[in-house]
Image (tube, grey):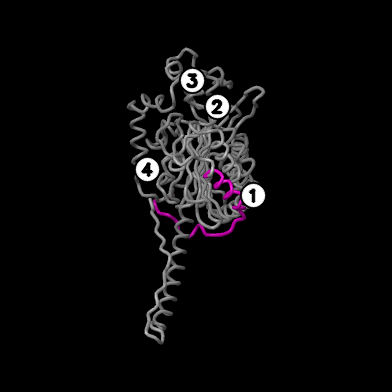
Amino acid sequence: MTSDFRDNLIPADSPRLTNARGLDPFEYAKPIIASDKAQSLIQTWQALYREPYKGVTANGQVEPNLFHLADEGLDIHPVVRAGNALLAAVSDGERAKLRYPVDAPEWRDWYNPEFPMNANGLRLDAVSPAVRDAAMNLMRASLSFDGYVKTQRCRLANLYLGELYDLRNIMNEWSYHFLLFGTPSATEPWGWNLYGHHIAINCFMLGGQMVVSPTFLGAEPTIIDRGPHGAFRLFENEETFGLELMRSLAPDLQRRATIFERMKDPAMPADRWHFADERQLGAAYRDNRVVPYEGVCAREFSSAQQEQLLSVVDSFIDYLPKGPREARMKQLETVLERTWFSWIGGHGEDDPFYYKVHSPLLMVEFDHHSGVWLTNAEPAKYHIHTVVRTPNGNDYGKDLLRQHYAQLHREGSAHMGAQHAHDHHHTHDHDGHSHSHAHGDHTHRHD
């Protein structure tokens, strides 16, 4: 296996490239979507999308009482300003496409291939630079500096691939959907998502608290050299920290952590490898997947290995701002005794590999993939997919949203009860006139 992705470039005169040049993304998508393989994938994904949301679970049952409403130190005010600036930047027609209710099912309709699979939200390649800038400013205000840079570099990696093949009409830094859910608020729930080729970021916010998951970040190739426009490599920490942890384990733990020795192993059950996701279990539309704990439990790790495991996870969630990131890491420390580490493949210097860290509160996956826009038939280190999930019902912040609605209902019921007692006691005043009181009505739609 060559270590230079350039040895696996598609020939410039390939019909796959020449037939796509000059097409807009939706025209380009039509023959792909019409193919039997894509139809099978889309039908599978849409059937999963139509399922009521439950969440990723270890055994089919959601573990209750894992998530709690709290102020985790998110400075929401600059995020609200950026959200309002985006709403001010769009036209009335764009605003109608951009906005969804906070509990809209479209949260879950994200994908990661390069061809458009739906027309949700605003396509950033079809709006003005001012609207693009406003959307990026909202992302920048929501995420940490490192996190925003990582998402920006994933978009630039997509542009780089478009430049390599002269397909910038299909793959560029703006070929993504952007959706806004709810209304920007310092106290009420709202959020946004961005998705397209190799990127999906779902960001839910409620006051000083946020959930940024599911996330899907990837790149092919991962080594970007756009000359004076920038050179960088993606996912180095996720790759290096995971490999260092695996190599630090004693031989017995390495053996038990390794659930399959080969990246596409004959011993794998039929549902353990998928042509779109390869080894990953938590990618697009897998919101309700049952993912059993597997590998070796971190309770068997030394304290240094447990710290390394936390560093691995931290490298995946570096997009969180300081307060929420620290809160999440503290939460993860409380379930270290129930956190599992599993591995597929080798752990030599040139070996491609997959690993998963899985706890009741978070699941992260790292996978080296075979070529899609490169010709390597076997997984290589220059095509990487990473996934973050919040199991047990809190992807998209859904459990926090449920608790928020329940709290509103309790507060409303308590207010109604107190008012009823007041009205019953003062049904009529001395001149015999009755009194009426108006109460706000909250209606919510759930997917």
- Closer to the camera: disc 1 or disc 2? 2
Which stretch is magenta? Answer: 58-87
> Does residue 26 appear to the left or right of 153 in the view shown?
left
In primary-sequence order, the first of circles 1 and 2 is 2
Could you say which is closer to the camera, residue 295 or residue 398? 398
> Label 3, label 2: how many angstroms apart (C-alpha)?
19 Å
> Label 4, label 2: how many angstroms apart (C-alpha)?
29 Å
Q: Which mark is residue 159?
A: 2
Write down the residue under mark 3: 375
In primary-sequence order, the first of circles 4 and 2 is 4
Query: Does the magenta segment cover residue 299?
Result: no
> Does residue 236 appear to the left or right of 115 in the view shown?
right
Picture coordinates of residue 42, whole percent (x, y)? 36, 34
Label 4 SS: helix
Q: Which mark is residue 49?
A: 4
Q: Which mark is residue 322?
A: 1
Quadrant location of the N terminus in the rendered image:
top right
> Label 3, label 1: how many angstroms apart (C-alpha)?
40 Å
- Closer to the camera: disc 3 or disc 2? 2
Q: Amino acid at mark 2?
A: Leu
> Alpha-carbon neighbours of circle 3 within 10 Å: few (<14), some, or many (≥20)?
some
| Secondary structure mainly formed by the magenta segment | loop
The answer to whether residue 167 is above or below residue 128 is: above
Q: Amino acid at mark 4?
A: Tyr
Could you say which is closer to the camera, residue 16 or residue 189? 189
Dots 4 and 1: beta carbons under 8 Å?
no
